[in-house]
Image (spheres, grey):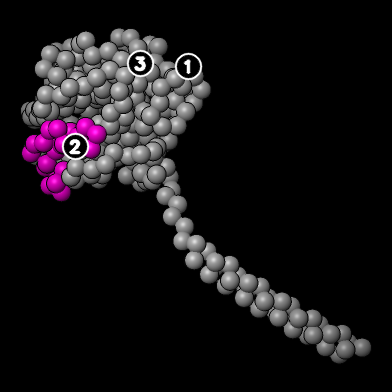
Amino acid sequence: MSGNDSYTKLLMHGDGSDSSTSIPDSSIGGDHGNATVVGNAQLDTAQKKYGTASLLVDADADYIYWPDNDDWYQGTGNFTIDFCKRFSDLSTHRGLFQQYVDADNYVSLYWAANVNKFIFRLKNASPYYYFSLESSVQSISVDTWYHLAVIRGWGEGSNDWAITLDGTAIATGTDADAWPQLAAPFCIGRGYYASATVYDRGWTDEFRISKGIARWTSNFTPPVGGYSKLDLNINISDVWKGIDEMKINIGDTWKEVSEMKSNIGDVWKTIF
């Protein structure tokens, strides 16, 4: 399916060979190269939502990141961060993504095990602002694939936010604050909660950052495949029409060649 376009600033398909640590960004709009792998983060072919593999993090301090880039800075514009998630352990808090400088300057999405909620937070020290978007209580299970998204532009409102789970809004809110301009890498598998760094346990697939667009503005059906560069929708009647026109043009070409042959004959006749 389509979904990798000029708005796409990061796209981790998570495809590759088992245990590989080569994890590239495949986005059209970003193209940030391979992620830096920390700890034992790696691709795993045993579990994947789409494609051949997914990113596996199975211990504290396992995560991946791309260096600081303006593509991570969303400002007050619309954006969508979406991905497929399969947890292997929910016994404690789980960090899903973050851009973190310090306790007063960060953006993070995480699973809070003490309240059974997904929570997205951003904080900026100067000028000071803080925004927290908390889902309703969720019954999340291990070894189950979910689609998660954080969206600004929900309901087509520029300051309206949502967290969605499998296409249904589980948190909505209104806030005019900007995504802070943070001099920090963008991390997958790591978050910040309760004054501590928290890590993920499980698999992540098809992680995408879309800048300048709310991919969904109301409840939706989750994607059924990985995001591609081109959505091929071929109209067969148009194809046949094109072939027919090509046939006509070939006929005209042969006519022109024939006329050229006659003219050449006249030239030789004139010479002799």
Q: What stretch is highlighted in magenta?
A: 153-174
Residue 253 numbered mark, or none: none
Residue for badge 1: 19
x, y percent for residue 137: 11, 24
Cα separation between marks 1 and 3: 11 Å
Residue for badge 3: 57
Residue under the image location 43 percent in, 35 percent down? 26
Query: Could you say whether the residue bearing mark 1 is in a helix, strand or loop?
Result: loop
Residue 227 appears left or right of 209 = right
First along the sequence among labels 1 and 3: 1
The answer to the question of whether label 1 and label 3 lie on touching residues, with beta carbons closer than 8 A, is no
Tag 2: residue type?
Thr
Q: Of circles 2 and 3, which is in front?
A: 2
Residue 157 appears left or right of 205 = left
Residue for badge 2: 168
x, y percent for residue 180: 18, 31
- Quadrant in which the N terminus appears: top left
Residue under the image location 22 percent in, 28 percent down? 182
Q: Residues within 10 Å of mark 1 (few under 14, many from 20)?
A: some
